[in-house]
Image (cartoon, rainbow, N blue to C red):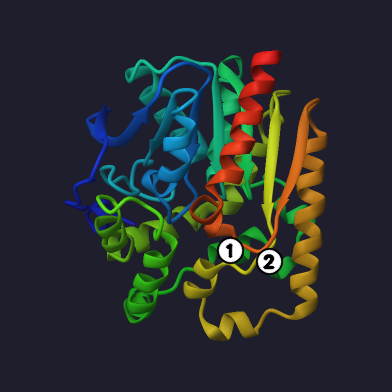
Amino acid sequence: MTDSTLSSALIPPIGDFQQIHGRRVFVHRSGDGGPAVVVLPGAGMVGLDYFLVHQRVARFTTAVVYDRGGTGYSDPVPLPRTAAAVATELHELLHDQAIAGPYVLVAHSLGGAYAHRFTQLYAPEMAGLVWLDAFHRDWDEFMPAEAGLAAGERMAPDLAWIRRQRPDLRRMYAELLGHHPEHLRPSLIEAHVSDNWLLGGFAERGNLVALADELRAGPDLPDVPLIALTTEGVDPAQRALTSEETRQGVSEQTLREIAEGRRKMVEALVSGVSHGERRVVPGIGHSQLCFARPDIVVEAIRDVVDRVGRA
């Protein structure tokens, strides 16, 4: 995908820009103290989607949300990107903003790939991790073939299909963002249903297999406090952005295998560190977590920050 495809003149309702190699990267920070808590959004999501989490975390430490290059309010770059490119961009952003480590990274969905690479490149600056249904480099070892990373790369619909879905997507985002402050909601809803943001979200997922290979070439996650939240509900975003034909092609057996694979995958993840914990969040879907249950996310963050302090 070219830069021109993703170029956007959208203006964020709050926050600032940091120049990174001649590009603007959107960032919003609040609070003070450490360790700083940094949210890495999932594909198709942006930093301000996590505002309800951000404002609560800012009450007890430095809280940071941002948009990766090529996504959200940040300037365009060709997508997809390597995990190293995203991790080094984030590292430069934090240092240019004088946000000192060590860091607690809160990784949602695809953000887990970039969080893992950050830990590989900057392990001495890591304090803790909060895993929100996040990317796992060994996904294919736990999942049926029809739900593998390669299949995920092929799920991107064409622009015409996306535009037909726009009314449903607008309603979905209006519901997801229902508890956001009024000065943020309207512009975020409209930006989310724009061609640029929708296409960017799919473009980021175009190299899932390569991301897993990149992470397997480096170390495991560091031995820092880690809490993994796992949702168990039906995800409205995945339903809205997946055709009916695709959904009908997934059998009940495959869905059960995916659920069991996710459980085993996260249990393996948390068992790989000395202070790892898995917490299940029933009744909500993958994309709803930060919108519907910010309290649970903040509780996990606070617990990791407290464990870092005790250590």
In percent of width and height, residue 138 lies at 73, 47
Q: Quadrant of residue 137?
A: top right
Q: Is residue 227 above or below residue 148?
A: above
Q: Quadrant of residue 220?
A: top right
Q: Residue at x 56, y 38 (%)?
A: 298
Q: Which residue is mark 1?
A: 152
Q: Is residue 73 above or below residue 173?
A: above
Q: Is residue 303 above or below residue 78?
A: above
In percent of width and height, residue 167 lies at 33, 78
* Residue 93 visible here: yes
**Which element type, helix, strand or loop, lies under badge 1?**
helix
Q: Along the polypeptide, which appears first: circle 2 or circle 1? A: 2
Q: Residues within 10 Å of mark 2 (few under 14, many from 20)?
A: some
Tell which of 191 and 159 is nearer to you: 191
Q: Residue at x 44, y 62 (%)?
A: 176
Q: CA distance from mark 2 to mark 1?
A: 7 Å
* Residue 113 visible here: no
Q: Is residue 168 above or below residue 134?
A: below
Tell which of 141 and 126 is nearer to you: 126
Amino acid type, label 2:
Ala
Tell which of 256 and 245 is nearer to you: 256
Q: Are marks 2 and 1 in contact (CB under 8 Å)?
A: yes
Quadrant housing the C terminus? top right
Quadrant housing the N terminus? bottom left
Q: Quadrant of residue 116?
A: top right
In percent of width and height, residue 202 lies at 44, 61
**Which element type, helix, strand or loop, lies under badge 2?**
helix
Q: Is residue 83 left or right of residue 304?
A: left
Tell which of 265 and 82 is nearer to you: 265
The circle drawn on residue 147 is: 2
